[in-house]
Amino acid sequence: MAMTQLTTASRIDRSKRLLYSAIGLLAMAMIVAVVNVLAGKVHVRLDVTSTGALKPSPRTVAVVGSLPEQTEVVLAANLASGDRDRRSVSRVLDMLDEMDHLSPNLRTTVINTGTSDGVMQYEQLVARLAAERSSETDSAIAETNHAMQTLTTFGQSLERWADQVQQLADDVAPGPSGTNPWTSELMQQASQMRVSAGQVPQVVDLAEQSLEQMIGSTPVPDIRSARRSITTAFDILSRLLSNEINDLETRRDDERLSPEGRARIDRLIREMQSNLDSAKATMESFRNLPLPVLSRVATALGTGEAAIVIGSGPEALGAIGIDDLIPQTAPGVAKIDAGRRAESLITDALASVEGTATKVTVVLTHASSTRVLGDGGILAELVRSSSLRNTTWLEWPMALESDPPSAVTLAHSRGPVVYVVIGLSMTSSGAAERATRMGAILQKLLDEGDSVLLNLSPSTLPAIGEPDPIAEPLARFGLVADTGRPTLVEHIAGHRREVDWEQLIIPGGGKHPAAAVVKGVPVRLTWPIVIERSEPIGQAWPLIRSNESGMWREAEWVGYWLTRESLRKQITDPPTPGDPGDGEVSEPVFAWAAERQLNDEPQRLVVVGSHLWMFDTIAHRRTTIDGRLVETSPGNTELFNALIDWLAGRESLIARGSEAQSFPIVQPMSDRRLSATRWFFIGGLPLLVLLIGAIVRLLTG
């Protein structure tokens, strides 16, 4: 009987355990089902980094949240390819997923072009985009063909003029030695004209190839490349012909030239000048024509891999090449944060195509005798990134053009224009005259109410009692800059004293939106200049304030400036504070934003006490951290973009971008949290195990 009761009790216990296990499994299944249902509707991602590196930036949230209608981002890429780092690709896909959950008006799609179905989907997408914009594209092709014909005719004329130039030697009397000095000179000039003209057919062939670009069976003409080929070739020919006209005008006054020869030169000059003026007008018009929407993205589409942003209208189209989105890296080489880079590029493209970013023209104004814009230039990265923010760049080299280019005048009728004025090295030849001219142009811009971003450089003029003409106009906004005494910083490293000419500043923020954007984000300035508030004219906001100790204003800075940068650290007697003319720095503010009323209209100015801070060598200086390639001063680009937005009246777009958040740092624990964590793992976990065991014991009897 007792054995029967024991067996029955054992069976009951076994049944209880089976029942509890079944209930537990059922509960877990229900929890998993509920979590999966909620996951499709609610997107939650916890982020323990102090900079929020695992979530979209404030700028991305603002841009995506303001999308007025349905917008699509299509990533077409060969996901099976081993050419790209898989973690980088995965990071980009994760970021696209994050952006997709920000707004119901944004949809993201991924096309794997590594499969035949993916290639077909991509070609169908391109065909649809091309068909919707065929009329505009056809018109641009006609304009390009007209420009090619103009270039061809101009080249043929140049060959014909070469023969006439060479024949002019027959109209000059021989010199005392019996030889004709014109013969070899004109023969060389004519040969150069023939060689240059002979390259025109090759340029035309190259332009035609760009116009004939195909994606699958769909024509996608790369008019941008064709235009670049045509205008570059014409610029070379026009300079050559201008030099030839100047040479003929000089030869026309030669006493040994016969009357018939002088008349022949007059006719030749008139014909050359007339043709040159006509061709220049045609090319200038062609150069300034807006690109058709499809051609703006033709280069990216032609690679077969791109991120395509498709907005709500025919004009709303953008594309980013896969090499820009996920740059290839060699094995063992540090990698960039591909997710942040992709987020930044796609966000800028979204703002541009949907019109949330008003089109802005930046006019780079400088006194250099050479042009600085262009592929591979010293501002290439800044220009490339800002172009996705609906920003167009023009260049005004005042040493080459006394008046602003005609494209600048046209830009004023299309939207906001911001002049970015860069100071010049005052130790170069003729710097004083160029500075005076730049100061006069700056005053004119301010008198006419233009928005200006002024970047100051140290000046040698205050040391000789002359005012700096570039800094003088700041008085109109109640500001004064000490350009005659740039700041230096001394550091004591062991027994060695070092003097730095650049500062890596961690801004503390401020009331201005641009100051808030770069709060806590490193900004690098070279040869920083102190700028102070002198009069309460309008409003002014400090943007960049240094917290360096050991800083002073150096009066005798020229020798240190002229020393090669790589050798400055080796100087045994670098500049020291306290010398005659030096000064202390009570308010180390290096950048201001100001606004005043001019003719009942607000006028805005930003002044930065450093002239190279925007340049790629400073703004995009990189280093390797934990195997990743990161920028050491991301605040430079962030500050520039925010300032352009403010000067152009685009305050709603001012927000910290994604690449300024590329330093994921886990939040440090306080002493209290650290102590609590230790006690949890040391004592809490064992107690939790004992508690669970006791509960199980009670339930099982």
Image (cartoon, rainbow, N blue to C red):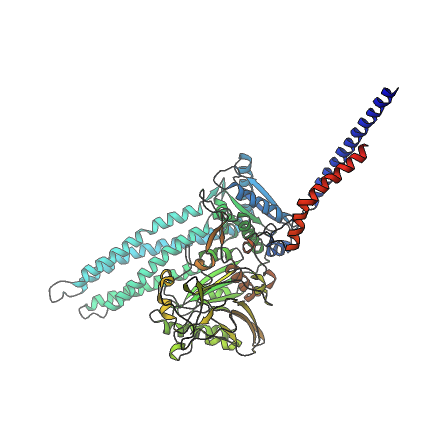
The x, y position of residue 81, in whole percent, is 50, 38
The x, y position of residue 429, in whole percent, is 33, 70
Q: Residue at x 80, y 26 (%)?
A: 14
For this rendering, which residue is in front, 402 or 619?
619
- Horizontally, is 297 left or right of 256 in the view? right
The x, y position of residue 351, in whole percent, is 58, 55
Position of residue 14 relative to residue 638, above or below, is above
Q: Residue at x 82, y 24 (%)?
A: 11
- Horizontally, is 685 left or right of 319 in the view? right
For this rendering, which residue is in front, 434 or 132?
434
Q: The C terminus appears in which quarter of the rendering?
A: top right
- Horizontally, is 15 left or right of 554 in the view? right
Q: The N terminus appears in which quarter of the rendering?
A: top right
Counting the numbered discs, the total is: 0
Position of residue 542 relative to residue 130, above or below, is below
The x, y position of residue 182, in whole percent, is 19, 62
For this rendering, which residue is in front, 399 or 12?
12
For this rendering, which residue is in front, 84 or 695?
695
Outermost residue toward the left in this view: 177
Position of residue 326 relative to residue 387, above or below, is above
Can residue 262 be seen at all in this image of the molecule? yes
Can residue 30 be seen at all in this image of the molecule? no
Q: Residue at x 37, y 63 (%)?
A: 568
Outermost residue toward the bottom in this view: 465
- Horizontally, is 571 left or right of 48 in the view? left
